[in-house]
Structure formats: structure tokens, C-alpha cells
């Protein structure tokens, strides 16, 4: 089969998968998003009543590596909370500069971490850091806005830190993540607590637990628990259901 034909076939299969997931969840393509005038930090697109945030540009990469972040977000506690096996296959989606990727790589010495981002500039920073530190088990992956571009049925865990609220196509992204997860695989969703007005973060950069559960259960993931282990963020655990 020619490359063009197989690409068309693959695209057709992906579309079918999305449509059948929408049918399964009772959603139609028209139901998913409402388009309107954007607010200051938003993209003018609403999903389950939440306006999607603008993407943090690569120009802000240094902010992700700020010194105070260790205290603000306790990244080691995040990775510890994931309970990864040493040989786990993990994806850090919306990886940015790899603030969490490198910590995960250390936690899975015989496994692998895929660092996915839509900004090639972020991936360039990440790639240079991987080379400089001679990390053998971290792979940068250029994702699309609506697809993490990860192999099917391959992952034990997915980490999303301060990234999900930026997904321009959250339904399609989470479908892609579900495809990449093995049955029983877990999604760890870390977002600033939207219920707490004292947390000095823009409203579109936070999420309530109820909102997150509604959105992730809409694609067929199962909410397992929310751990109270972080200073100002939710640590939410979801699971790819095991059939039968
Ligand atoms: C606020 S940064 C957080 C980066 C990293 N998770 C961290 O905590 O340091 C959000 C990142 O998500 C990425 N992003 C936004 N939409 C994405 C998508 N659909 N797929 C992959 N990455 C995405 C952005 O390019 C950006 O690098």
C-alpha cells in the first residue's frame, strides 16, 4: 500500500475511533465545544462550561524552572505519589522543559518516559538537556493539538501537570491518551485547586475537582481518588478501565 493511502487509512481509523467514543459517551461532535469571544486568558472555546486557557508560550520556559517551584509544587512528592514500577512506561504530556520528565526518568531506571509537547521550541530545550545529562530513557515526542502521537496500548501511566487546562481539544487528546494506555493504566492530573480563591493563579489556569472528574469521565476514564499531598494543587488519579 502507498504511504499516502496508508496515511488516509490511518486518519480514517482515528476518526472512526473518536466518533465511536463520542457515541459511547453520548456526545456528538457538535456537543463538545462552544465557540465565543475569548476572555483575557482564554481561547474563546468552552468545554463542559470551562473556557480553555491559552497555551503558555515557550518564551516563558524559564518560569517552569524557577527555584521556588520545588516548594510551591513539591515535584518529588508528585512523582512519589505516582507509585511507578522501575520498568514503567510513562508519558509526561505537556512536558514543557521537562521539569517532571527528568524526575520520572530517574524513578523508572529500566522503563521509559515519553515527553510530549506541541511546541517544538520546548522540545528543543528538553532535547538539549537530555543530551547534556546523558539520559538514556527519555524520549521527546512532538504532539499535535488533538493527538499525543503515542503508540497504542503501551503506557502504564500518564502525567499531566498544569497542562490539561491548555488542551485546545481536550476530548480528542484524552481519547488519544486512552488509546495509548494499557488497561488499568493511570492518568495523574495535577491542576491548581479551582475551589480556593486564595491561590494566586489565574482562574483559567486552575480546575475544580468536580470539573476535572466530569471532563475525564466523559471520555470513559474512571476517577479513582484525589490525594491531598500537594500544597496548592489537586493530585487526581484516573484509571483506564479493565474490560470484563
Ligand atoms: C504550563 S506548561 C507546563 C509544563 C510542564 N508540565 C511543567 O509542569 O513544567 C504547559 C505545557 O503544555 C503544552 N501543551 C499545551 N497543549 C498541549 C497539547 N495538546 N499536547 C501537548 N502539549 C500541550 C504547552 O506547550 C506547554 O509546554
Image (cartoon, rainbow, N blue to C red):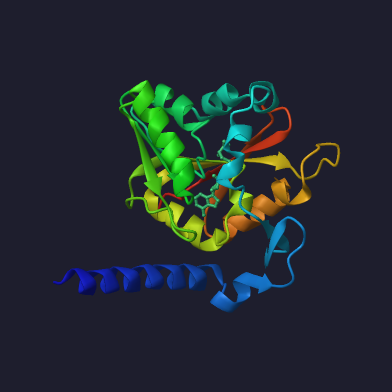
Q: Which quarter shows the C terminus?
A: bottom left
Quadrant housing residue 104 = top left
Task: Note whether 65 is above or below 203 in the view shown.
Answer: above
**Residue 184 visible in the snapshot:** yes
Q: Identify the residue at image location x=59%, y=49%.
A: 164
Residue 78 picture location, percent across and down? 57, 28
Q: In the shown orientation, is residue 176 left or right of residue 112?
A: right
Q: Which residue lies furthest to the left in this view?
A: 1
Quadrant housing residue 11 = bottom left
Residue 176 picture location, percent across and down? 43, 57
Q: In the shown orientation, is residue 62 left or right of residue 46?
A: left
**Residue 182 visible in the snapshot:** no
Q: Identify the residue at image location x=59%, y=29%.
A: 65
Q: Which quarter shows the N terminus?
A: bottom left
Q: How many labels does the image show?
A: 0
Q: In the shown orientation, is residue 123 left or right of residue 238?
A: left
Task: Note whether 77 is above or below 31 in the view shown.
Answer: above
Quadrant housing residue 105 = top left
Q: Identify the residue at image location x=30%, y=27%.
A: 136
Task: Note whether 152 is above or below 45 in the view shown.
Answer: above
Residue 3 picture location, percent across and down? 19, 68
Q: Which residue lies furthest to the right in this view?
A: 198
Q: Residue furthest front?
A: 59
Residue 222 picture location, percent across and down? 55, 50
Amino acid at each position: 500500500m502507498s504511504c499516502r493511502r496508508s496515511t488516509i487509512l490511518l486518519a480514517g481509523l482515528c476518526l472512526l475511533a473518536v466518533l465511536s467514543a463520542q457515541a459511547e459517551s453520548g456526545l456528538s461532535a457538535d456537543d463538545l465545544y462552544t465557540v465565543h469571544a475569548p476572555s483575557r486568558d482564554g481561547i474563546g472555546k468552552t468545554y463542559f462550561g470551562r473556557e480553555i486557557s491559552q497555551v503558555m508560550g515557550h518564551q516563558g520556559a524559564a518560569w517552569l524552572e524557577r527555584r521556588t517551584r520545588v516548594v510551591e509544587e513539591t515535584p518529588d512528592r508528585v512523582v512519589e505519589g505516582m507509585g511507578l514500577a522501575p520498568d514503567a512506561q510513562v508519558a509526561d504530556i505537556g512536558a514543557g522543559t521537562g521539569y517532571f520528565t527528568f524526575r520520572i526518568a530517574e524513578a523508572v531506571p529500566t522503563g521509559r518516559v515519553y515527553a510530549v509537547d506541541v511546541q517544538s521550541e520546548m522540545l528543543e530545550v528538553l532535547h538539549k538537556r537530555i543530551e547534556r545529562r546523558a539520559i538514556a530513557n527519555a524520549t521527546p515526542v512532538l504532539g499535535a493539538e488533538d493527538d499525543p502521537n503515542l503508540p497504542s496500548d503501551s503506557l502504564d501511566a500518564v502525567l499531566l501537570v498544569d497542562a490539561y487546562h491548555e488542551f485546545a481539544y481536550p476530548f480528542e487528546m484524552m481519547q488519544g491518551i486512552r488509546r495509548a494506555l494499557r488497561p488499568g493504566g493511570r492518568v495523574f492530573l495535577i491542576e491548581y485547586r479551582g475551589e480556593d480563591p486564595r491561590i494566586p493563579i489565574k482562574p483559567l489556569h486552575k480546575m475544580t475537582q468536580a470539573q476535572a472528574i466530569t471532563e475525564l469521565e466523559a471520555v470513559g476514564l474512571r476517577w479513582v481518588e484525589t490525594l491531598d499531598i500537594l500544597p496548592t494543587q489537586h493530585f487526581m488519579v484516573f484509571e483506564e478501565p479493565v474490560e470484563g
